[in-house]
Structures are given as C-alpha cells and as structure tokens.
Amino acid sequence: MSGHSKWSKIRHKKGIKDAKRGKLFSKMAQQITIAARDGGGDPDANFSLRLLVDKAKSASMPADNIKRAIDRGIGKGEGGQLENALYEAYGPGKASMIVEAVTDNKNRTVAELRKLFSDSGGNLAESGSVSWNFDQRGLVIVESAKLKKSDKYGEPDIHVPEDPEETMLQLIEIPGVVDVDTIDYEEEDSAEERVHLQLITQAQDLISVRDQVHNLGYIVKDAELTWIPRSYKEVSPESREKLHNFLERLDEVEDVHNIWMDVKLD
C-alpha cells in the first residue's frame, strides 16, 4: 500500500500558504463558483461544494464572499463565465508540466503563461506532448479520525482518532482504490498533529470512493482529480534552483490553481 507517497511533493498545489490572502480568496471563490455551477448551490447536496466551503471558512474567507461565489455559480451573480483549462508546458530543466487554470478569459491566461514560460527558458507545448507521461487519477485526503458531534450547544465537534494502520486496511478494500499511504497535510486551523492518509483512485471512481469513505464515518479533507507522472526525470542543482524560483512566479498567476510535473523537489 505504498509507492505514491512522494508524488504529493511533486504537485505544487495552491492552498492556505499563499502569500497574499486576497489572491487566495479569489482562487477559492473561482473553485466554489465552478462547484456550484456543476453540482448546484446547496452544500448539503453538493459534496464537492461543501468541501470547498469548509476550506474557505477555515482560511477565514468572509461569508459574503462565499455566498457571492455560490450565487455566481448558479447564475445569480455578475461576471464572465468561468472555465477550467489545462495547459501542457516545459519549464526550467525541461521539466514537463501540466498547469490547471480557472479563467473567464482564455486568451489572457494563455498569453500570460506563454510569456512566463518563455522568460524562464521554457515554453507552452502542444496538446499531448506532455500528458502522455501522466495518468489522471483521483485523490482523496482522509483524516484517520471520525467526527463525533458535540452534544453541547456552541462547542465544536470532536475529532476521534482512529488507528492509521487499521484505517488503511479498511480503506484499501474500497472498490476503486489503487493505493493508500500516509501523507504530510498541514491544517492552518488546527494546532493538533493529526494523521492523514491519501487515497489514489481510478479517475472514474473518485466520487464513489469519496462517498464511501464519508459513509464509513471518516473525515474527508479533500477530493479531486490529479495527474501522476509515469516516470520522473533528474535535473541539475542549477535547474532545480531555477525550477523553485519559477514555481513561485507561476504561483502568483491568479488564474493558476494547480501544477503537476515530472521532477521531484524533495
């Protein structure tokens, strides 16, 4: 039940460590809007939306911002139509990358990305020239704990830890799960050290696996599609340094939400 635990360090995921909170809220709002558009605006009936709303609340995103993002997704708000877009590219050291963006103007986004990659010595690539080395998989992040509802008004629910080994043995039996392993997962809203597991699934089984984990009573922290390289390449220390710096600049692009690549940056 191992073999993919390191890949999470390859994926330069957006999250609560964004330097500028305003940009963080903007990215979260875009994701919430798309989730509401695709699955409806009721978090109780739209599990993906509920996960995103919970993330936004934990990052102290104002409730009004969350509501506006949901309203936009269900057609009540203003603004252009948001779209998901995937771009294939080569970065410093010829690192192969897949970049996921959420944008209301693809021409603007592709122009910004093309300039950024060009300035770094890389380039945007033709469709298929990079993705052939990646497999799309589902990723479910699970806390090895179950949530016990508080019986006192105003008090938070209690996280009841479960034995990680027993949790892994139970979750690996879920149809569609390819791999289970422990993962480093930081939570800004918790000072406690909690054990988290990552489940890799077949892409088409992501929703089913997520729901089954949830129905077993475990705390699902995240669930999404991801890209895992079939093979990795080594780069020189100089290229590794350039790659680190480039990823920081790429992070600053407001439309960029996720980046996957075939170079390990342990």
Image (cartoon, rainbow, N blue to C red):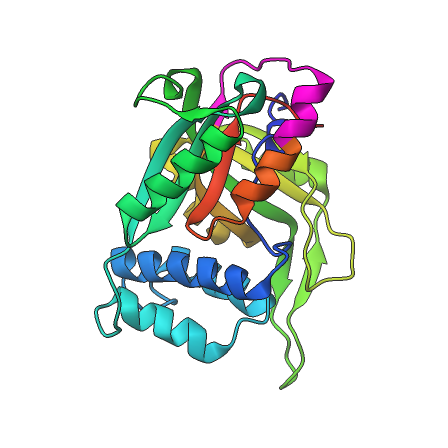
Give, as a single range, the part of the protein colored magenta: 228-243
Residue 62: % across, % down: 51, 76
The furthest residue to the right: 192
Residue found farthest to the bottom: 153
Q: Is residue 211 magenta?
A: no
- Residue in the image at 63% along x and 49% along y: 143
Does residue 239 show up magenta in the picture?
yes
Judge whether 264 appears above or below 187 on screen: above
Which residue is drawn at the image coordinates 48% and 48% (left, top)? 253
Q: Is residue 95 left or right of residue 208?
A: right
Between 140 and 120, the one nearer to me in the picture: 120
The answer to whether residue 143 shows anywhere in this view is yes
Residue 76 image position (x, y, % from top left)? 23, 74
Q: Quadrant of the C terminus?
A: top right
**From the image, which quarter does the N terminus lie in?**
top right
Report how many numbered discs are placed on residues in the image. Answer: 0
Q: Residue at x 60, y 25 (%)?
A: 4
Seen at 64% across and 15% down, the residue is 235
In this view of the protein, can residue 173 be seen by the observer?
Answer: no
Who is closer to the viewer here, 245 or 65?
Answer: 245
Where residue 16 sits in the image (x, y, percent)?
61, 56
Q: Left or right: 231 with respect to 34? A: right
Task: Looking at the picture, tell me which residue is in the foreground, 228 or 237.
Answer: 237
Point out residue 162 in the picture as x, y percentages from the top left corner.
70, 49
**Residue 232 is drawn in which quadrant?**
top right
In the rendered structure, the answer to whether residue 169 lies left or right of residue 136 reads: right
As drawn, 58 above or below 85: below
Say left or right for 10 vs 253: right
